[in-house]
Image (tube, helix red, strand yellow):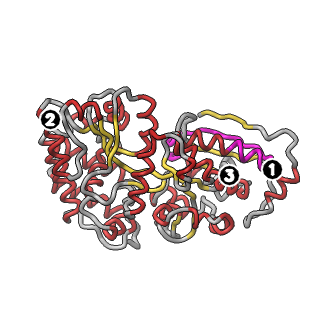
Amino acid sequence: MRMRRITAAVGASALAIAALAGCGSQAQESDGVLTLWHYEGDNSAMGIAWNRAIEIFEEETGATVEFEERSFEQIRQTASQVLNSDEAPDLLEYNKGNATAGLLASQGLLAPLDDYVDEYGWDDTLAPSIQTTARYDEDGVMGSGSWYGVPTYGEYVQVYYNTDMFDEYGLEVPTTVDELEDVMQAFADQGVTPLAEAASEYPLGQLWYQLALSQADRQWVDDYQLYENPVDFQGPEISYATETLADWVDAGYVSPDATGLLAEDAGTGFINGTYPMFVSGSWWYGRFLDETDHGWGTFLFPGSDMAPGSSGNIWVIPERSGDKDLAAQFIDITLRPEIQAILADNGGVPVNADEADLTNEDVASLTENFNTLLDRDGLGFYPDWPTPTFYDELNAGLQGLLNGTLTPEQMQEQVGSDYAAGIPAQG
């Protein structure tokens, strides 16, 4: 854990702080200190942008920010206990979705933000598909009910490809799944495994879900994610995904060794040029800019209008926060076009940037692809979101498929049972 104290501007007026504390709809007496947790590194797009937001916040309010960087796992594993104690921060970044932010909201650990949404106009700032992960009903199901979080960046899954290797073999960017399979076969014929993958963590699950999304429509996504109707795990969407993935393993497009690999292994395999393609999230983009020596580019998964993706993780204000008004003002600063442009120029996906403010041409495609998905209503969320335990259960099923201990039908039966057992009773 890294902690730093960022001091207030010299000569700041205490009266300004008191006035600020009274301006929100959930007014409380402010001590002029905002305690903030997030898990973004200093050199990440979000970390760079939010550091600038801290500076602006302190300049404008005269308040002090006490920031602690906590890892994703630290926050995930301890959130329920910490947020129900006097150790709760005033503001923190938290994972979006039913099993995470939704669960905490249903437990009464997060403050509803509807009054702040009205005050700052966040519902006008954020696209409707981005708002889905901000709102949760009384059972913690996203998409309706009160606002319990505010997303300030986006994320989505795309295909990263090694342009040097494509050029070496005379290959073009595929525009259909058939063309993608032709490209993968060309690499396999040369003894090169085409896809960087990992089944111990999220990458293989996201590829499986991407394949399902290529056969799905918005109603299927709403059924899978929001429980609007039962999901048939032997139906055409999931069967296509599972059977196609099994075929790709048999063809040598995915290595069976991926069973024991982590996301980091897959990502570094692409970085060092072992694999020519990697289907994964936009969160890798800035790192690839920094660490990859070979040429590379991106494209949206061919033959699909949708991709795994959503808002990024969200700012949440704990119910036990002592400075809810200060926390809301900080959130609003992170949504300003100035901060959003900093985020974009450093490899993040902005949700409220003015394109005229963007200066880094190397990251232009990242924003363009995201906007393409928004225009299509193409954010399909993530495969593990529906239940608190489905992430591990899906990984286990895909590991069985990859190592041959489960047939496609058996895998679907297993994960379908896991899914059904975990969804809320009202679903």
Cα gap from disc 2 to disc 1, whole angstroms: 62 Å
Q: In this view, does 329 lie to the left or right of 45?
A: right
Residue indicated by mark 3? 330
Tell which tag, 1 or 3, sits nearer the viewer. Answer: 3
Residue indicated by mark 2? 188
Cα gap from disc 1 to disc 3, whole angstroms: 15 Å
Above/below status of 373 relative to 267: below
Question: Which image quarter: residue 384?
Answer: bottom left
The amino acid marked with disc number 1 is Asp
Above/below status of 252 relative to 417: above
Q: Are marks 1 and 3 in contact (CB under 8 Å)?
A: no
Give the extent of the magenta segment. 54-78
Task: Examine the residues drawn in magenta and state their main secondary structure.
Answer: helix
What is the secondary structure assignment of the residue under circle 1?
loop
Cα gap from disc 2 to disc 3, whole angstroms: 50 Å
The amino acid marked with disc number 2 is Ala
Residue for point 31% across, 31% down: 269
The question of residue 71 being in magenta is answered with: yes
Q: Is residue 311 left or right of residue 319?
A: left
